[in-house]
Image (spheres, grey):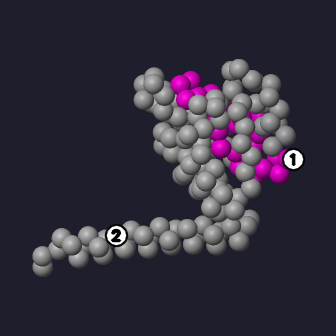
Amino acid sequence: MGSDSDLPVVEKAISTLAQLSVPTEVHVYSAHRTPIEAREFSVNARANGFGAIIAAAGKAAHLAGAIAANTTLPVIGIPVKSSTLDGIDALLSTVQMPAGIPVATVAIDGAANAALLAAQIIAVDDADLAARLDEMRKSASEKVLRANAEIEKKYSTI
């Protein structure tokens, strides 16, 4: 994340990855205030065993692009809502990457989906993780169907 103030958003990604038993590292690197450390991390990420990188940042939100510029691993950007422009600035900064440096971008504060997308990318070559993702989807579906049954029972008059 670009700042420790992004942690409340990023925690949703951390907990989602933990539910899926995906090993995770968490760092605070700023594209502007710690560019050397951000570059060092991204240049070495593949050699250090990463399969995908999630980068969360608000306002100018250049972190995902700075990371993507230094690795060919998939990079997923989370635009973080800040007091400025309700996160629209971060969304536009994250999604508007030049040709050749892609960043997959999720919704503003969309950390859970960033984690799921990272897990789906990694699961291309990990059948066990793919099965855990399938189970998570099945569980989410069952939860919605239970809620539907309760609401139908309570409010349907036909």
* Residue in the image at 47% along x and 67% along y: 140
Q: Position of residue 28 (x, y in %)?
A: 70, 33
The secondary element bearing badge 2 is classed as helix
Q: Vertical placement of 87 versus 131: above or below?
A: above
Report the disc number at residue 18: none
Q: Residues within 10 Å of mark 1 (few under 14, many from 20)?
A: few
Q: Vertical placement of 134 versus 94: above or below?
A: below
* Sequence-first disc among 1 and 2: 1
Q: Residues within 10 Å of mark 2 (few under 14, many from 20)?
A: few
Residue wearing tag 2: 147
Counting the numbered discs, the total is 2
Q: Vertical placement of 92 versus 15: above or below?
A: above
Query: In the displayed structure, does residue 48 sit left or right of residue 33?
Result: right
Residue 2 visible in image? yes
Quarter where residue 134 is shown: bottom right
Quarter where residue 55 is shown: top right
Amino acid type indicated by mark 1: Ala
Residue wearing tag 1: 47
* Residue in the image at 83% along x and 51% along y: 49
Q: Position of residue 71 (x, y in %)?
A: 77, 39
Marks 1 & 2, CB-CB < 8 Å contact: no
Q: Identify the magenta region.
A: 46-73
Q: Position of residue 11 (x, y in %)?
A: 59, 46
Q: Quadrant of the C terminus?
A: bottom left
The secondary element bearing badge 1 is classed as loop
* Residue in the image at 37% along x and 73% along y: 145
Foreground: disc 1 or disc 2: 2
Q: Is residue 51 magenta?
A: yes
Q: Is residue 43 magenta?
A: no
